[in-house]
Amino acid sequence: DVKVTQSSRYLVKRTGEKVFLECVQDMDHENMFWYRQDPGLGLRLIYFSYDVKMKEKGDIPEGYSVSREKKERFSLILESASTNQTSMYLCASSLQGSGSYEQYFGPGTRLTVT
Amino acid sequence: GENVEQHPSTLSVQEGDSAVIKCTYSDSASNYFPWYKQELGKGPQLIIDIRSNVGEKKDQRIAVTLNKTAKHFSLHITETQPEDSAVYFCAASEGGYSSASKIIFGSGTRLSIRP
């Protein structure tokens, strides 16, 4: 079974802090994604990566950056956390070239910025 | 870019009855339409998907239909059971390599099954 793990289930940070959310997948997937989930807005793509050191902006990249130094690990960085970044953050991965576009999600990190 | 609208936002049905969730999309280039189910405390999980060259697909109690002309697709769950209670997301994708299988999600439907 594909496993996507996220470093924390719950996180509380203060405004202005630098925040790191880590995601690790164990199935050698090329693609990795970061989403935020807010009630009534569904899942919105923040950034994605299709290879090591490669990244592309999603629909709401402002205030976020990402890092992918190793194939299995994709980090989301909030350079200076703000209260409007309080949300559920979901990481996902998928395989390239298999004909299947299924994304496998981690359990999520609920981040509260106070 | 692609925009996916999903209705209703909440749905309550009696156990054993059917549930239908509807979505529309805007980009005619989209050719892959997955549905994800998110149970409490978990990440979304793919339950069924359909490609644009197919009008309908069924897997046991769930089925999806696609009308490319109208840019509509729907999820049908028959003989609903308590374990069907969850949030359901529709999505659309161009499915191309260059987009790394980027998927646009709808806003979600919270389905509750009444005993």
Image (tube, rainbow, N blue to C red):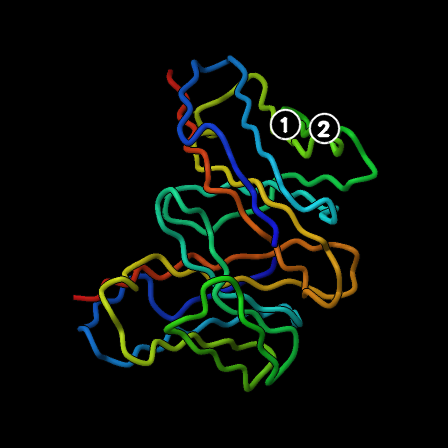
* Relative depth, front residue between A53 and A24: A53
Residue B72: x and y in percent read 65, 31
Q: Quadrant of residue B99?
A: bottom right
- Circle 2: residue type: Lys
* Structural crowding at the residue carrying mark 2, measured as other residues with C-alpha within 10 Å and reported as few (<14), some (14–19) or many (≥20): some
* Structural crowding at the residue carrying mark 1, measured as other residues with C-alpha within 10 Å and reported as few (<14), some (14–19) or many (≥20): some
Residue A2: x and y in percent read 60, 60
Residue A40: x and y in percent read 38, 42
Work out which quarter of the rendered image holds the C terminus of chain A and state it.
bottom left
- Which residue: 28% across, 79% down? A80
Is B1 situated left or right of A40 in this image? right
Q: Callout 2: residue from which chain? A: B
Is B57 situated left or right of A78 in this image? right
- Which residue: 47% across, 78% down? A66
Residue B62, numbered label? 1
Q: Quadrant of residue A65?
A: bottom left
- Circle 1: residue type: Ile
Task: Return the residue at label 2.
Answer: B58
Q: Quadrant of residue A56?
A: bottom right
Q: Secondary structure at mark 1?
A: strand
Residue contact at pointers 2 and 1, CB within 8 angstroms = yes
Is B42 situated left or right of A28 in this image? left
